[in-house]
Image: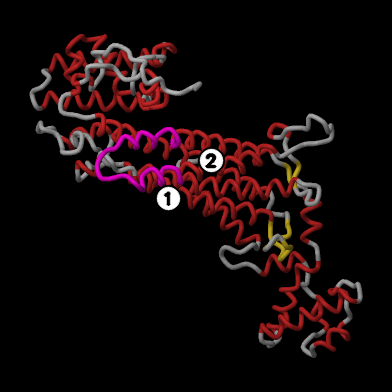
Amino acid sequence: MAGAIETTKMTERKDDRLWGGRFERAPNAGFDAFQGSFAFDQRLLPHELAVDRAWARALKGVGILNAEEVRQTVAALDRIAKRAQKEKTFLESPDAEDVHHFVESALVEELGPLGWKLHTGRSRNELVATDFRLFVKDAAAQIKTAIAELVSTFVTLAKVNLHVPMAGMTHMQHAQPILLSHFLLAHAEAFLRDIPRLESAAASADACPMGSGALAGCSFPIDREAVARELGFSRITANSLDAVSDRDFALDYLFALAGICTHLSRLAEDFVLFASQEFGYVLLPDEFSTGSSLMPQKKNPDAWELIRGKTGRITGALVGLLTTLKGLPSSYQRDLQEDKEALFAAHDQVAAMLAVATGALSATKFREDKLNCAASNSALLATEAADYLVRKGMPFRQAHDVVGKLLNQAERENKKWTELPVAELKKLSPVFEDDFSNGLDVEAALAAKSVPGGTARESVRAACKELEIKLKKLGAKP
């Protein structure tokens, strides 16, 4: 069968494997390709080299390496790092089983038998956990910066569009007038909530497993605290058995990414709708749109549609890792190799999604005429009419009922309810007076919502200032 593993095809055992001493024959060639991870975990190389440098110094502290051996080892690791940056073919190693095997092989090539001493007292189980934690810490910081840039774009657009009203909606039905700026800041607030989740994921990853061994701890009196400090960790892991199998930090990071994408997808859905002819609220930027291969007139919101579509794979990565972990016994299992590939891909996709969303949003033009027209629909002022009656002393539930009947009557007569004469209104309730129509407009409705967090201009201006303060604390340019 094409693609099947050939059970009889064997190769000679290689002496440079990290585990091959007790085996008489090399792995089946198909299985060897199947179980290797270097194709994707080479991404951890900078972190692996950092851990190796710290471990070399730790081995000096317990007398395994002398000062000269540490110097030679660290210098060789630095050369490996430079080769990886400059030589594209260096990482195209057909024999490397994983990033740990790759580095040890390269180290032995540089130093001879001295290169084999570095693995003293440690296991790949703790190594990969440490590398992966370092990656998640860096990745979370990168995404946090990207979110701050997106939020900054929302604030800039909100300040520019403070004069533009729009129809706020619930259930996809026009509800009450709001400012376009208020709508934009609503999205900004959602993305700001993603930042603490990213920080929580980074904090979860901020514990160093080195010194845990394969599961039982290190046989040499390694200074674990010193290793952790050198690698930038705030603490060491508490239990060696837990340390080699804990992937909660990866789940936390994927959960944070899934939350970001959920917010991106909602933003995308809004702009896909707003770009439609039925809404016409925005003009799509050429730079973030595509056309039709058949219909010359089309401009499609592909940037937003792809953001909306890619959200599924991020959620899938979270569910996939949860599913992998849920049936595992204690300690390290090889199943855990499946934790990285999906997380790497999810991180890359979210970084790209945030960059595209920021670019598309900043380049989008809003149709003030369309937004104003929708906001001017008199039906959106129905709540203001009920509030008028409440101010006259009527209980709100009764006021709600009266205004509902008022709108129903206007619909039957095919009239605008705001144009009905006061004499007609008094038939529904004697509370109506000649001042009813005073202030019954979009501007008055907006101005009435002056509570903190409301859509009045003064409230939205204050919200912009608050967001600029938060962005400054995040190191972003408001």
Q: Give the class, few, some or many, for how many residues have Cα within 10 Å of label 1's Cα (few <14, many ≥20).
A: few
The answer to whether 434 is drawn above or below residue 311 in the figure is below
Which quadrant would residue 50 be assigned to in this image? top left
What percent of the width, then of the height, locates residue 235? 23, 42
Q: Quadrant of residue 112?
A: top left
Residue stretch in magenta: 319-343
Question: In the rendered image, which quarter is residue 249 located in?
Answer: top left
> Across the whole image, how many numbered discs are drawn on residues?
2
Alpha carbon of mark 2 to alpha carbon of mark 1: how far?
A: 22 Å
Mark number displayed over residue 288:
none
Residue 327 included in the magenta stretch of the image: yes
Q: State which mark lies toward you, 2 or 1.
A: 2
Q: Secondary structure at mark 2?
A: helix
Main SS, magenta residues: helix
Where residue 473 appears, as percent x and y from the top left, is 44, 46
Element marked by disc 1:
helix
Residue 138, x across and y down, in percent? 39, 35
Amino acid type of the residue that numbered disc 2 sits on in the rendered structure:
Arg
How many C-alpha atoms fall within 10 Å of the one at disc 2: few (<14), some, or many (≥20)?
some
Q: Left or right: where does residue 438 sit relative to residue 264?
A: right
Q: Quadrant of the C terminus?
A: top right
The image's colour scheme reads secondary structure
Amino acid, disc 1:
Pro
Residue 259 higher or lower than 346, as above or below: below
User: Horizontal placement of 412 versus 453: left or right?
Assistant: right
Which one is in front, 312 or 167?
312
Q: Which residue is mark 2?
A: 313
The residue that label 1 is drawn on is: 196
Q: Residue at x 56, y 43 (%)?
A: 311
